[in-house]
Image (tube, helix red, strand yellow):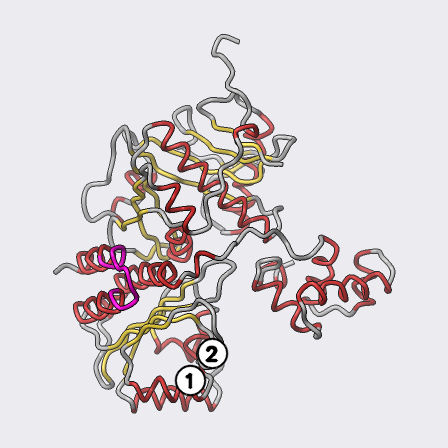
């Protein structure tokens, strides 16, 4: 069973968050060997993981992380603007309606065939989140091999600049436009897999 | 036109392309704009033998395609084999350092050169669960490859492959049928792929020898194959196991 934890509407769920930071360490540091800081030997947390970051986390019925993505507001330092502006030929896109997708992460404990379904659910959750919150554009930095998969989801992408070789590999930047037609575009590619509404923990009132 | 503008123009044309013919024209134009003569976009299958949604668009000389298919090179082409080893584009001059070239490989490369196909650059296109493919660009034999366009080739190749997938209907397969194998069958297939015998697998998993034999027999039945060697291939193809699973443990 898969649950969706959206950090804008759900109470902080410690198991989900902790297991997410642990999964990020396993994927980005141990597997992909990115040069990132590790907290307590267990958690991958960087300077952008503050109270303005948002997280979409898919978990099992015990709230343990299966897949997640981090969204960063673009009206302040973020990865493309602060770390890789050279990947943009023009000024980096920023605005209230522009958010950056980062740390797209599938847990390593998930088996290959299930990975594809989880990946599709996470992509669908990103689209749903955008439509529900007035986000019109996602930006992102991606290694070129992964970029092909991103294009295959069927959403409307365009590069912001030429790819550049870096110590982390050949990286490119993308701008993804989200409209009400995006779910149908994802469905045409066999990607559209929204997590059923019943699997989303209920919104809790701020005063509760 | 700036290099990025070439890519942007291509991407817009590819998005609007309603037919493979339109995509072909867009690729031909971008190829020229980048200063190259040939392009080839293809899934890595044997086109003479296989049917089903797949794509091949190129402007190589016609006699080259005939010879290529006659030899069934779609599966053994050295450039295609090198694609398994790289997630990003590579120049053809790097291929001898990437894979071990057989005499037949050298024959293929020489013949390409004699046909007028000179130095080139190939962008592998990998989408999980689907056949590997690639997009290549090349200059005329004897010309120098314009290295400054490499990164733009990368973008054009990636967007071209995605447009081709869309047009060929590769994307309308139901991709979420669920796993074909049970967990235990999958474990046995994975250990077999790692080179273990049935008896060794039974020791590793802590079950009886007969149980492993049955798991692998059922796995073969589920995939409809007779041979143990094909199990790993089928499981790799549908994503039940990955190369990393097999090689890194």
Residues in magenta, as a range: B13-22
Q: Is residue B45 left or right of residue B160?
A: right
The residue identified by callout 2 is: B46
Task: Give percent across and percent down for residue A130.
Answer: 37, 33
- Chain containing mark 1: B
Q: Is residue B141 left or right of residue A70?
A: left
Badge 2 crowding class, 10 Å Cα cut-off, few under 14, some 14 to 19, many 20 or more, is some
Q: Is residue B22 above or below residue B181?
A: below
Residue at image point 56% right, 64% down: B237
Q: Earlier in the sequence, mark 2 or mark 1?
A: 2
Badge 1 crowding class, 10 Å Cα cut-off, few under 14, some 14 to 19, many 20 or more, is some
Residue at the extreme left: B1
The picture quadrant where one finds residue A81 is top left
Residue at image point 35% right, 90% down: B110
- In terms of depth relative to the viewer, which is nearer, B163 or B39? B163
Residue at image point 33% right, 30% down: A73
Q: Is residue A59 left or right of residue B193?
A: left
Residue B69, numbered circle: 1
- In terms of depth relative to the viewer, which is nearer, A207 or B185? B185
- Chain containing mark 2: B
Secondary structure, magenta segment, majority class? helix
Q: Are marks 2 and 1 in contact (CB under 8 Å)?
A: yes
Task: Give percent across and percent down for residue B112.
Answer: 33, 87
Q: Image quadrant for the N terminus of chain B?
A: bottom left
- In this rendering, the count of numbered labels is 2
Question: For the residue labelled by badge 2, is the local secondary structure a helix, a strand or a loop?
Answer: loop
In space, the residues marked 2 and 1 are separated at their CA atoms by 7 Å
């Amino acid at each position: 069973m898969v649950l969706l934890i959206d950090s804008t509407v759900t109470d902080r769920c410690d198991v989900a968050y902790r297991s997410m930071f642990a999964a990020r360490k396993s994927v980005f540091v141990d597997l992909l060997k990115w040069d990132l800081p590790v907290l307590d030997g267990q958690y991958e947390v960087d300077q952008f993981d503050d109270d303005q970051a948002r997280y979409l986390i898919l978990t099992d019925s015990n709230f343990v992380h299966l897949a997640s993505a981090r969204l960063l507001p673009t009206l302040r330092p973020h990865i493309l603007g602060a770390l890789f502006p050279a990947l943009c030929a023009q000024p980096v896109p920023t605005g209230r309606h522009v958010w950056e997708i980062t740390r797209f992460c599938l847990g390593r404990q998930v088996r290959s065939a299930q990975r594809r379904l989880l990946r599709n659910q996470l992509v669908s959750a990103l689209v749903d989140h955008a439509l529900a919150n007035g986000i019109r554009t996602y930006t992102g930095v991606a290694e070129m091999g992964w970029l092909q998969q991103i294009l295959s989801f069927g959403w409307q992408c365009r590069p912001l600049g030429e790819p550049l070789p870096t110590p982390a590999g050949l990286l490119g930047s993308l701008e993804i436009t989200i409209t009400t037609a995006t779910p149908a575009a994802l469905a045409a590619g066999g990607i559209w897999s929204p997590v059923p509404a019943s699997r989303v923990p209920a919104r809790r009132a701020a005063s509760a | 036109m700036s290099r990025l503008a070439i890519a942007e123009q291509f991407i817009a044309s590819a998005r609007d392309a309603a037919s493979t013919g339109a995509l072909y024209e867009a690729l031909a134009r971008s190829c020229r704009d980048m200063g190259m003569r040939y392009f080839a976009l293809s899934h890595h299958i044997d086109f003479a033998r296989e049917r089903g949604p797949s794509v091949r668009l190129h402007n190589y000389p016609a006699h080259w395609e005939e010879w290529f298919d006659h030899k069934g090179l779609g599966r053994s082409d050295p450039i295609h084999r090198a694609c398994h080893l790289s997630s990003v584009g590579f120049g053809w001059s790097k291929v001898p350092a990437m894979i071990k070239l057989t005499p037949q490989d050298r024959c293929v490369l020489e013949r390409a050169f004699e046909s007028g196909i000179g130095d080139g650059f190939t962008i592998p296109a990998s989408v999980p669960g689907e056949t590997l493919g690639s997009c290549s660009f090349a200059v005329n034999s004897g010309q120098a490859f314009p290295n400054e366009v490499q990164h733009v080739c990368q973008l054009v190749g990636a967007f071209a492959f995605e447009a081709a997938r869309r047009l060929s209907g590769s994307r309308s397969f139901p991709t979420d049928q669920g796993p074909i194998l049970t967990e235990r069958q999958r474990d046995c297939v994975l250990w077999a792929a790692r080179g273990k015998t049935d008896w060794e697998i039974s020791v590793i998993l802590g079950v009886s020898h007969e149980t492993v034999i049955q798991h692998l027999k059922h796995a073969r039945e589920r995939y409809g194959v007779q041979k143990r060697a094909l199990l790993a291939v089928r499981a790799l193809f549908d994503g039940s196991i990955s190369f990393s699973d097999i090689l890194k443990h």
